[in-house]
Image (cartoon, grey):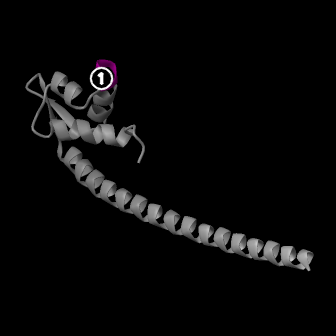
Amino acid sequence: MSKYRDRLQIIASILSIASNGAKKTRIMYQANLSYKLLCQYLDDILDSGLVCFEKGELYVLTAKGKEFLDRHEAYSKRRKSVEQHLSHVNGEKTALENMCLSTSMVSTNRNRLSKNRELKK
């Protein structure tokens, strides 16, 4: 996995923090976002109906936001599983390539030895 978060990961992080109600400052610090980026994301997720603004200061998760979090969690698990499987497949590919290299190197060395023996005769 890359070391940077993608857009979906950032949104999921914001929604997770807002799941119990949170002010903008708390979301900003816990999601590790600049104020400018946070405002952009909050505008997007407010427009999408994933969170709502309650009591004049708290961002609260909506039913749609809860569904997003549930689906994102399932997606993340599947993605991790696929990445692990792909890593295993790539390891197998490397092992097969190494076997081919080893075999061709052995036969090359055998050919060199037999040529050297013929030259010595």
In this picture, is 27 found above or below 118? Answer: above
Q: Is residue 7 above or below residue 27?
A: below
15 lies left or right of 76 = left
- Which of the 4 image quadrants contains residue 40? top left
* Residue at 58% from the left image edge and 71% from the top image edge: 96
Mark 1 burial class by Cα count in 10 Å: few <14, some 14-19, many 20+: some
Q: Quadrant of residue 114?
A: bottom right
Residue 2 shows in this picture: yes
Q: Which residues are magenta?
A: 34-38
Foreground pick, 57 / 100: 100
Q: Residue furthest front?
A: 121
With 21 as the anchor, is 70 left or right in this view? right
Rendering coords of residue 37 (x, y %): 34, 24
Find disc 1 in the rendering and name its residue.
39
Q: Is residue 92 magenta?
A: no
**Residue drawn at (17%, 36%), measured in percent from left and top?**
17
Task: Check the image and report above or below for 39 versus 45.
Answer: above
The image position of residue 101, as x and y in percent, is 67, 68
Residue placed most toward the observer, 81 or 48: 81
Amino acid at dot 1: Cys
Q: Where residue 12 appears, x then y in whole percent?
A: 27, 42
Residue 84 coordinates in the image, percent (x, y): 40, 61
**Image: 23 above or below 113:** above
State yes or no: residue 37 in magenta: yes
